């Protein structure tokens, strides 16, 4: 369903972030992407959701050829992908509850569903007591968990999590990974970008390793290895 | 999706977000409203200025006229014939006939307190005043044409004198003043309206610029464009509505202060009475202008940040 074909991304016409990348992710897979800082992991996500356009190659998501979509066509694509951004990207004038509810509201889901699901997921990420706090009143880890809840609330076909545990303590990290595994077992495709060696090794799922904009390893039941 | 129910839900949410954004941006909203209020205030002043200018112009216009005095031996029939022919001129607005006896009674009334004049009139056996036609033109610049017609040779035997020749300078000057007044009024209105629109537009664009990251986030989490644009339009309309009411509140005391001074300059102009008499329609203008400017600026500004 997701396929990168000979994709290169050169920023500002000189900085090569990705070089001739190719991979396919099937529905229901759980894929980790690892690599050093600046290896190009977040760039892959940006290309997938049409935030950036590839310099070369094609990015396919289901029926969409993402690199050809116009701005007006992007919302339809993005509503099928739940994204946890590395820098959270919460709406600053909305509190935790409203940030999560936003994902349902814009889809036109009825109020009754919102009132049922939002408290549930707040509870799952352990933030029931922070529901009415605004992003600037939340700690880094709390913001990250709001972002995770927002990405998952409308049960998208794909969840993409860019370093979702970067700010979390070991206990919350374990909880979030469990959550990702659970939605994956319910059929959601999960793409996890992480620097957490323990997590990757413990998962024992497919791992794509990037180095300097190239894929150096792509293994089923992979381990966290950076050469 | 697409049902009336879900459309109502969507609309409700868009309005809710708009109000929420307005309230939570606190100072930013207040500052934006203040600037839009000033723009509307200028607009309101222009409406009032134009109303006064129109009034002043009408007063001036009304003061300009031509009188044709006829020789005393000319019969009333002949004068009325002249009247009809003058009336048929396209430049003429109206013509009023003043007979000799009417002229006398007006004269007597005006000078009833002046003993020497009253006595002088009593001494005279015959009414010394002439019959006349009082002519008003549609436009002050038409008087030379009318005057030329009256000085025509056909009328030479009937007409004693035409006042235009004596008042030529004053009439021409008044005509110029009237025309300049109108031109300046229109130019001022156009220029100030454009400036105030630009200032309001710029302010709203800056307000939205400062929240461009939020627009980007909404785009990235897949919000449909109507959900991004809609609340900003609602917010812009709220700015306009509040600014409209405030501009009326701001000008009310200023009018009370200025009104007596304006009355001294132009006794026929009661700006306070005009303001309160037209309060509803003025408020309506302000609301239309405010809402339009708020909504349009928001649409223009949001577009710029919807490209992510
Ligand atoms: N908008 C941009 N303009 C220019 N260069 C960029 C931009 N975004 C990323 N880059 C560069 O592209 C390269 C890859 O960046 P990317 O964010 O994909 O790395 P990453 O693998 O996510 O790193 P990290 O682990 O630090 O998050 C980096 O060298 C980065 O400096
Ligand atoms: Mg990154």
Image (cartoon, helix red, strand yellow):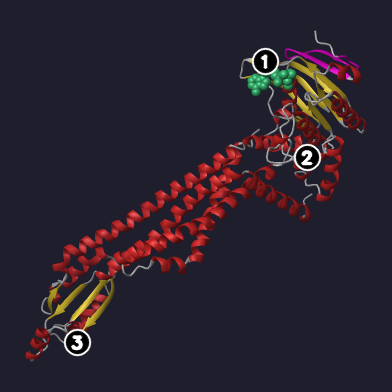
Q: Which residue sits at x=68%, y=34%?
A: A70
Q: Which mark is residue B105?
A: 3
Badge 2 element: helix
Task: Give the SS element for disc 3.
Answer: helix
Q: Quadrant of residue A218?
A: top right
Q: Main secondary structure of the magenta part?
A: strand
From the image, tell me which residue sits under label 2.
Answer: A100
Q: Residues within 10 Å of mark 1 (few under 14, many from 20)?
A: some
Q: Tell me, yes or no, whether the highlighted magenta stretch contains residue A220.
A: yes
Residue at 42% in and 69% down = B273
Q: Are marks 2 and 1 in contact (CB under 8 Å)?
A: no
Segment tinted magenta in the rendering: A206-223
Q: Quadrant of ligand 1?
A: top right
Residue A10 lies, in percent from the top left, at 66, 18
Q: CA distance from mark 3 to mark 1?
A: 103 Å
State the image coordinates of residue B157 (x, y, percent, origin top left). 10, 79
In space, the residues marked 2 and 3 are separated at their CA atoms by: 90 Å
């Amino acid at each position: 369903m997701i396929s990168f074909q000979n994709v290169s991304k050169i920023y500002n016409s000189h900085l090569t972030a990705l070089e001739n990348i190719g991979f396919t992710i099937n529905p229901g897979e759980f894929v980790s992407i690892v690599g050093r800082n600046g290896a190009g992991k977040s760039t892959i996500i940006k290309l997938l959701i049409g935030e950036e356009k590839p310099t070369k190659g094609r990015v396919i998501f289901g029926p969409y050829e993402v690199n050809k979509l116009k701005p007006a066509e992007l919302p339809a694509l993005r509503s099928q992908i739940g994204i946890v951004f590395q820098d959270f990207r919460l709406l600053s004038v909305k509190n935790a509850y409203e940030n999560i509810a936003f994902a349902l509201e814009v889809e036109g889901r009825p109020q009754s569903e919102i009132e049922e699901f939002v408290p549930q997921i707040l509870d799952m990420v352990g933030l029931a007591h922070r529901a009415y706090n605004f992003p600037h009143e939340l700690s880094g880890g709390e913001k990250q968990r709001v972002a995770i809840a927002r990405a998952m609330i409308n049960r998208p076909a794909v969840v993409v999590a860019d370093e979702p545990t970067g700010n979390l303590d070991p206990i919350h990290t374990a909880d979030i990974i469990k959550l990702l595994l659970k939605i994956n077992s319910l059929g959601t495709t999960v793409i996890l970008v992480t620097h957490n060696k323990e997590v990757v090794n413990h998962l024992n799922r497919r791992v794509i390793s990037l180095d300097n904009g190239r894929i150096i390893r792509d293994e089923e039941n992979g381990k966290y290895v950076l050469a | 999706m697409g049902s009336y129910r879900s459309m109502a839900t969507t609309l409700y949410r868009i309005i809710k977000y708009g109000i929420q954004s307005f309230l939570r941006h606190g100072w930013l909203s207040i500052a934006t409203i203040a600037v839009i209020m000033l723009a509307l205030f200028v607009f309101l002043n222009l409406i009032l200025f134009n109303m006064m200018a129109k009034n002043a112009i009408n007063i001036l216009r009304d003061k300009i006229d031509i009188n044709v005095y006829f020789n005393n031996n000319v019969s009333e029939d002949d004068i009325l014939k002249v009247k009809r022919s003058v009336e048929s001129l396209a430049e003429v607005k109206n013509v009023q006939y003043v007979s000799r006896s009417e002229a006398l009674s007006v004269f007597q009334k005006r000078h009833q307190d002046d003993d020497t004049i009253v006595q002088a009139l009593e001494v005279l056996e015959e009414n010394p005043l002439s019959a006349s036609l009082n002519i008003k033109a549609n436009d002050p610049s038409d008087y030379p044409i009318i005057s030329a017609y009256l000085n025509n040779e056909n009328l030479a035997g009937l007409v004693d004198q035409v006042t235009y020749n004596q008042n030529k300078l004053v009439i021409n000057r008044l005509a110029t003043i009237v025309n300049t007044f109108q031109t300046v009024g229109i130019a001022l209105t156009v220029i100030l309206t454009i400036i105030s629109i630009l200032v309001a537009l710029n302010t709203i664009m800056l307000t939205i610029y400062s929240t461009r990251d939020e627009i980007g986030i909404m785009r990235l989490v897949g919000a449909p464009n109507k959900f991004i644009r809609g609340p900003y339009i609602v917010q812009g309309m709220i700015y306009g509505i509040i600014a409209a009411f405030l501009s009326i509140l701001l000008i009310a005391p200023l009018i009370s202060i200025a009104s007596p001074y304006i009355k001294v300059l132009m006794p026929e102009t009661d700006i306070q009475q005009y303001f309160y008499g037209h309060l509803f329609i003025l408020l309506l203008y302000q609301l239309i202008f405010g809402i339009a400017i708020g909504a349009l600026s928001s649409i223009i500004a949001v577009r710029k940040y919807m490209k992510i």
